[in-house]
Amino acid sequence: MAGSVPLASAKTPTARNRTTRSSGVAKWVLIGAAVLVLLWLIVLPLAVVIIESLKKGLGVYVDAIRDPDAMSALKLTLLVAAVTVPLNTIFGVAAAWAITKFKFRGKQVLVTLIDLPFAVSPVIGGLIYVLVYGAHGWFGPWLQEHDLKVIFALPGIVLATLFVTFPFVARELIPLMEDQGQQEEEAAVTLGARGFRIFWKVTLPNIKWGLLYGIILCNARAMGEFGAVSVVSGHIRGETNTLPLHVEILYNEYQFSASFAVASLLLLLALVTLLLKSWFTRKSQHQQ
Amino acid sequence: MQTSASKRGVLPGFGLTMGYSVLYLSLVVLIPLSALLLNSTGLTWAKFWDVATDPRVLASYKISFLTAAAAGLIDTVLGLLLAWVLVRYDFPGKRLFDAMIDLPFALPTAVAGVSLTAIYSQNGWIGSLFEPLGIRLAFSPIGITLALMFIGIPFVVRTVQPVLQDLDAEVEEAAATLGASRFRTFRKVVLPELLPPLLTGFALAFSRGIGEYGSVVFISGNMPMKTEIAPLLIMSKLEQFDYAGATAVALLLLLISFILMLLINSLQRRVRKTAR
């Protein structure tokens, strides 16, 4: 639900000039208003990150990013994404295969349950893991006995991130594979192809761009998640601090330029994501 | 195994993919969520009622609701404008325009939070323009609304856009030929078709707004009773190790989210039907 909109609905718009040719003035007034809204709502926040990060000069910018705490936050963020994105991708492909290639009872319930994490506040996404693995949680005493740490440590951050990014790949693939039906795969079976080979040779080429689209959205959220990770991280500098949390720490210490410098790294991630996203969208439309 | 697979069709892998999906779903989503529902913190009814009727908690729900509703409404109007222009007109830079709409989906919420605070605080770009008028944008409910508007706008645009694209321009032309004015055509012909997606877009933005945390905590100022949102209250109860209190606030929020989700699902099915 919250977080992404399926690729199928994100077509590049095609203009219909016929209906509007009669009033050139109205057209340009509306376009002008829309451009203003876009500049105000979306471009301004983007520009402010860049301007604020360079306010005290390039030196402060470079220092903020080369700071050991920032580097360790960057490493942790990359590590968390490297674990969570593949796990949720494997799940997404498996779930989409089961849901779109077979008939079974309770399919709609399963689809709704997969969407659940998008409906839940990220703070609750963190809280539930504290209730399960925290000191007072279900497994808390057992974990303590065996000297294992989940909450306020890497496993907790990974789990909370898994939760908030859970639906991305699955909900991208399900409508896509639904539209494609299963004739091609059935033909492959008739021709003697087996198991995983069918997926690899027949299904994957058809869903490749949609899959990549889901993966980059999942990755952007995994690297950028704040609320859920904030609950389970414990904010230990140099240890359990991800990049978004580092932005917050610097900001609360009134190191605004440094905070925006680290934020600009995350902005770069967002811009690369958008670039890849529109590329994949175009590729996938080409394919359909 | 073999028999059940052949009943379902000729394709292989049902048992494996279904089993794995359900197992993974249970481990990552269902079991942890049930910790909240099964009341692992020993929350009693009395304590739950105490928390739920605490003035500070009630105030936080009111703020979350009102700001999310206001942001959703403004986004619905602005989102319709953006979607309309993107579908109906051609202009230079349109592809970039279209791509930029998704920025709030891709930008980490903490980055949005610090950036919006810099824009709307007293000495910020826009905040400083309103300061002489005695209007505070950041650290007030207006600031929270502005942050939620940023987060919510793509939901409206991306829900309305495909429906608008499928809308038959010929019906409008017919209405125009029959002498209907431009505004009348829009009101009588276009708007009824757009109502379901607009409602869905609003509900999506509203639902996201109620749970939103990262973009809001910086700009809200987090003053109890005034600018403290419900998710933040969960956070501060956790920081005080009040797990039962945090669970109580979260349960209410979760209930609201579930109701909204079911509403959105049925709305989306309606939209898909009209779009085809």
Image: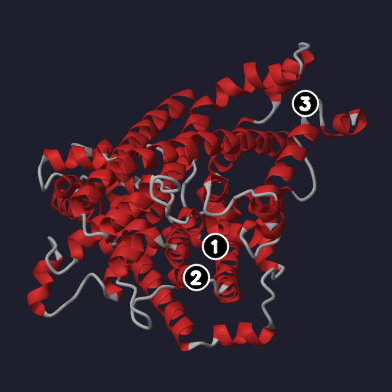
Can you give x and y, in whole percent of width and height, for residue B221 in the image?
A: 29, 72
Q: Which residue is mark 1?
A: A124
Label 2 and label 1 in one chain: no
Q: Quadrant of residue A282?
A: top left
Which three-letter amino acid code belongs to the residue tagged 3? Leu
Which three-letter amino acid code belongs to the residue tagged 2? Ile
Q: Is residue B120 left or right of residue A145?
A: left
Q: Secondary structure at mark 1?
A: helix
State the residue at coordinates (18%, 37%): B92
State the residue at coordinates (29%, 52%): B82
Label 3 and label 2 in one chain: yes
Can you give x and y, in whole percent of width and height, for residue A43 in the image?
A: 21, 48
Q: Residue furthest top?
A: A191
Q: Are marks 2 and 1 in contact (CB under 8 Å)?
A: yes
Q: Which residue is mark 2?
A: B234
Above or below A112: residue B240: below
Front in this rendered view, residue B90 or B8 = B8
Q: Does label 3 or label 2 sit earlier along the sequence?
A: 3
Q: Which residue is mark 3?
A: B11
Would you say residue B181 is visible in this rendering?
A: no
Q: How many C-alpha atoms fall within 10 Å of the one at disc 3: few (<14), some, or many (≥20)?
A: many
